[in-house]
Amino acid sequence: MIRIKICGICDLEGASAAVEAGADMIGFHFCSSDRHVTPEEALAILDELSVRPKVVGVFIDQPAEEVRQIAEYLDLDLLQLHGSEPAGFDAGRPVMKVLKVKDGVLPDAEQWPDPIMLDSWSADQRGGTGRTWDWDLARPLLAARQVFVAGGLEPGNVGKVVSGFKPYGVDVSSGVEARVRVKDPEKVRAFIRAVRLAEVHS
């Protein structure tokens, strides 16, 4: 089953919408981001959920010790690294390195463990870009590795990605928002429905 990650969670309503719709993972931005939350805010949200999904922390070039402290405080399942962290980055939890597809070139993923995430590159954004890229480029990697596809996904196109490429996982943030920091529950449900439907028919 394809893993579905709803990222950029900023409040209990967004987290609840993701969990109730069947998301496997939710992500919190502990880096410089429009969707930044503090570890204390994330803990308050998690404490109110009736079911705890896998929880991912998103970081950009932060010291390993800082990442480790946040990971332990929240018992994070996965550390998503969006910066220029070196291979072998160790903060005591499994990592998922985000690799950017730039100018039609697939990045080298050899030094990083599974899972990895492929996202589109942007000159002005270090985190997620919300922009699609040529998914065909990733076919060799998708066949050999556990790859999350990110970048410009939304309810209208995620089914195509799932049926055409069968990734290990898909990641969405802005594609299921009513506005920045606020998830739209119907878009969240539609996104997850589209993934599961495409899985059944592919």
Image (tube, rainbow, N blue to C red):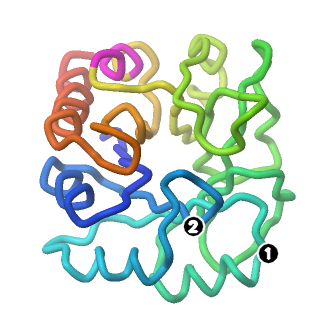
Magenta segment boundaries in residue numbering: 156-161
Residue 59 drawn in magenta: no
Task: List x then y, in percent, for residue 38.
Answer: 50, 75
Task: List x then y, in percent, for residue 7.
Answer: 42, 50
Q: Residue at x 67, y 76 (%)?
A: 67
The C terminus - image quarter: top left
Residue 96 located left or right of residue 76:
right
Instruction: Residue under label 1, please give it.
Output: 63
In the displayed structure, 180 sits above or below 70; it is: above
The N terminus - image quarter: top left
Q: Secondary structure at mark 2?
A: loop
- Disc assigned to residue 30: 2
Report the label total. 2
Give the amino acid at mark 2. Phe
Mark 2 and mark 1: Cα distance apart in space: 12 Å
- State the residue lying farthest toward the right: 86
Q: Residue at x 60, y 17 (%)?
A: 133
Task: For label 1, count other residues whose C-alpha is less than 10 Å away and answer few (under 14), some (14-19) or many (20+).
Answer: few
Give the amino acid at mark 1. Pro
